[in-house]
């Protein structure tokens, strides 16, 4: 028995017996000797058959005598040619088209050599039909016994795999070179959990053809019927650089069937490599984004980071920790990680110390609301770049505790920005959110105020301040994707706030690439990644259920819970005023944010007093005065929930 990973978990797969194990246990020298002996016998048999066919079974006496002299010469040159071409060392497991070609060439050379030897020894010429018949018979017989065991082995393994316990009946999407290579690997893997039934492809010219003995059953649009007809449980997508739109289309086709999915890595499209089953990975929400993945110039990032002193606040969070990991790989002069969460900070520091033992690394447990503590940190470490990722970000929770959102997101940001200004930092990068545009939540309003705070400080500072706005970050702590995964694993239901709710999404590497490149590259005071079209949350939930091999609404129900306090049906990335100033550079939108109001400092002081006193009415009134586009959407009662 062998343990194989199948569909994300361990599955016990019976290992089929290999019918060629006996030949593989022989020593190489003995195996080569047996191969040559069989080749000699086949050559002799082919010659006799050729002569019998030429003379209709009645061989003239002079031909019988001639065979006694010519047969040894023919066998000798054939064996010599086979040895010269290395065909006595034959792999019954991995021989393919190139080996077949060498076999034909070796026999062509042997036939020419035999005719030359016959002339040299003054033997009378044979009938050309005998020469031709012997060549074709010898080549065919040698090919059959060399390739038949491999074909028998593949047939036997496929039959055993089809009967094995826990095997998965599989279709491959894509009958191109990638699909063919994947199919070959699956057929040659005795312990694999996949029993391939066939392939599908949108090229009509391939329909009805066979690849390694497996038929191309139809187009991709025929998937639903084929899945039902052949009881398919696994679909393997083997089309390099398949667009997210096509992936979503495939998921939509199979939405009513319990079938799981795997896909080959996109890197296969760029690398000249053999594709194997081990390279397959589960479909992920990142594969569904309505745009191509965005990568940033690693050399440019390296040029910006190497040799610089860097501080990251909120370093234990999803974004902060990824910033720390990526920055650490570009050889900064020093890296300071600051967070109030000492447990996650401890694990991050250990990880970075193992990966980069030579990196000067400091970990600091501190609260960004403690201005004196931050000033001491800045004076001691003198950071040149400050990445400010510390924030309260959960929308419903901040609706219940608005004073905490203000103290942390607004005045905590002010403290970190003042520290950067005081210690002479070159650049300060604020992690903001699309919820800061026309905010309807306290969290969004607090992040909009944080943007205004750093612009106010930037007006009289030598430090360059940049705010970077994110959409939703796939896979970050508290985001909708991990929540949906947990709900699916528990058997549902999957909860969605509203059927028409949409969000912009980006991956963590995209988010961090944007932070580093836009923040340090001098792009401007406000940067937003071009994130393509927004994604419907209900569609994302249905696709994630389908990717798990389940049927939305049947195996896992989707329940609409209604918008929570502070949430909007859709988000925008830029305000109308910011839209008028935007430019796009390297898929990064750069805009000028609106200036703070003239009474900004007085209102900010009033807001701080209200937050410290827990005076919610005064706090909300001051927020509306500072941000005229803020439209609170408070619902009766306070109920904490995870943010989507």
Image (cartoon, rainbow, N blue to C red):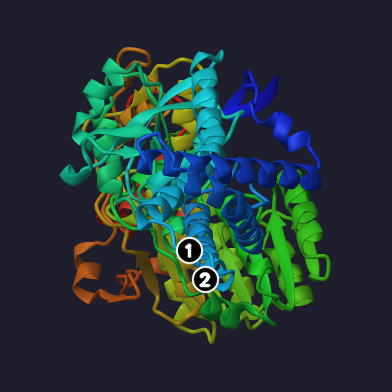
Q: Which is closer to the viewer, label 2 or label 1? A: 1
Mark 1, secondary structure of its residue: loop
- Residue lying at 40% horizontally and 63% vertically, measured from the top left: 294
As drawn, the residue found furthest toward the bottom would be 462
Q: Which residue is mark 1?
A: 124
**On screen, residue 628 above or below 535:** below
Residue 474 in view: no
**Quadrant containing the N terminus in the rendered view:** top right
Mark 2, residues whose alpha carbon is within 10 Å: few (<14), some, or many (≥20)?
Answer: few
Is 202 or 35 nearer to us in this picture?
Answer: 35
Mark 2, secondary structure of its residue: helix
- Residue lying at 71% horizontally and 73% vertically, measured from the top left: 378
Mark 1, residues whose alpha carbon is within 10 Å: few (<14), some, or many (≥20)?
Answer: few
As drawn, the residue found furthest toward the front would be 61
Coordinates of residue 8 in the picture (x, y in percent): 55, 29
- Residue lying at 52% horizontally and 59% vertically, measured from the top left: 102
**Quadrant containing the C terminus in the rendered view:** top left
Coordinates of residue 87 in the picture (x, y in percent): 62, 54
**On screen, residue 590 above or below 354:** below
Q: Which residue is mark 2?
A: 119
- Residue lying at 45% horizontally and 73% vertically, measured from the top left: 518
Quarter where residue 191 is shown? top right
Is 388 or 44 nearer to us in this picture?
Answer: 44
Is 598 or 101 nearer to us in this picture?
Answer: 101
């Amino acid at each position: 028995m062998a343990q194989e990973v199948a569909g994300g978990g361990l599955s016990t797969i019976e290992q089929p017996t290999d019918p060629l194990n006996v030949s593989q246990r022989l020593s190489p020298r003995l195996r080569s000797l047996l191969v040559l002996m069989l080749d000699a016998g086949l050559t002799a048999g082919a010659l006799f058959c050729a002569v019998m066919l030429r003379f209709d079974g009645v061989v003239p006496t002079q031909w019988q005598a001639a065979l006694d002299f010519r047969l040894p010469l023919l066998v000798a040159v054939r064996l010599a040619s086979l040895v010269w071409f290395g065909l006595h060392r034959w792999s019954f497991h991995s021989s393919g088209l190139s080996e077949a070609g060498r076999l034909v060439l070796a026999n062509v050379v042997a036939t020419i050599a035999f005719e030359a030897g016959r002339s040299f020894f003054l033997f009378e010429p044979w009938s050309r039909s005998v020469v031709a018949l012997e060549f074709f018979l010898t080549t065919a017989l040698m090919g059959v016994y060399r390739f038949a065991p491999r074909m028998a082995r593949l047939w036997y393994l496929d039959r055993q795999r089809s009967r094995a316990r826990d095997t998965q009946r599989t279709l491959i999407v894509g009958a191109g070179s990638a699909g063919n290579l994947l199919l070959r690997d699956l057929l040659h893997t005795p312990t694999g959990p996949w029993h391939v039934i066939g392939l599908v492809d949108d090229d009509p010219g391939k329909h009805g053809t066979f690849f390694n003995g497996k038929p191309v059953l139809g187009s991709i649009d025929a998937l639903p019927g084929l899945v039902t007809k052949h009881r398919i449980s696994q679909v393997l997508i083997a089309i390099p650089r398949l667009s997210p739109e096509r992936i979503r289309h495939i998921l939509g086709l199979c939405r009513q069937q319990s079938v799981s999915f795997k896909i080959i890595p996109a890197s296969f499209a760029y690398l000249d490599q053999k594709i194997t089953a081990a390279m397959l990975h589960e479909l992920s929400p990142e594969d569904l984004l309505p745009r191509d993945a965005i990568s940033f110039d690693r050399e440019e990032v390296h040029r910006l980071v190497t040799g610089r002193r860097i501080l990251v606040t909120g370093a234990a969070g999803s974004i902060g920790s990824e910033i720390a990991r990526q920055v650490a790989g570009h050889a900064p002069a020093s890296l300071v990680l600051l967070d109030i969460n000492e447990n996650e900070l401890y694990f991050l520091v250990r990880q970075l110390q193992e990966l980069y033992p030579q990196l000067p690394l400091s970990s600091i447990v501190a609260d960004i609301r403690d201005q004196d503590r931050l000033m001491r940190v800045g004076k001691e470490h003198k950071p040149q770049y400050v990445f400010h990722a510390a924030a309260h970000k959960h929308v419903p929770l901040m609706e219940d505790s608005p004073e905490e959102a203000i103290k942390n997101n607004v005045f905590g940001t002010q403290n970190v920005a003042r520290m950067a200004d005081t210690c002479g930092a070159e650049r300060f990068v604020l992690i903001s959110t699309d919820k800061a545009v026309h905010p309807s939540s306290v969290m969004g309003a607090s992040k909009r105020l944080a943007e205004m705070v750093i612009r106010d400080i930037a007006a009289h500072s030598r430090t360059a301040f940049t705010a970077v706005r994110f959409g939703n970050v796939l896979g970050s702590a508290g985001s909708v994707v991990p929540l949906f995964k947990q709900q699916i694993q528990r058997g549902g239901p999957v909860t969605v706030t509203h059927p028409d709710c949409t969000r912009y999404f980006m991956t963590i590497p995209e988010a961090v690439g944007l932070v580093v490149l836009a923040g340090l590259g001098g792009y401007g005071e406000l940067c937003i990644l071009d994130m393509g079209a927004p994604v419907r949350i209900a569609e994302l939930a249905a696709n994630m259920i389908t990717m798990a091999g389940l049927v939305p609404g049947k195996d896992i129900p989707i329940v609409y819970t209604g918008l929570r306090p502070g949430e909007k049906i859709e988000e925008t990335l830029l305000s109308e005023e910011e839209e008028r100033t935007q430019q796009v550079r390297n898929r990064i939108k750069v805009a000028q944010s609106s200036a703070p109001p003239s009474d900004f400092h007085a209102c900010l002081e009033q807001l701080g007093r209200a937050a410290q006193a827990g005076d919610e009415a005064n706090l909300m009134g001051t927020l509306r005065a500072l941000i005229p586009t803020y439209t609170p959407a408070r619902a009766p009662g306070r109920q904490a929930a995870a943010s989507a």
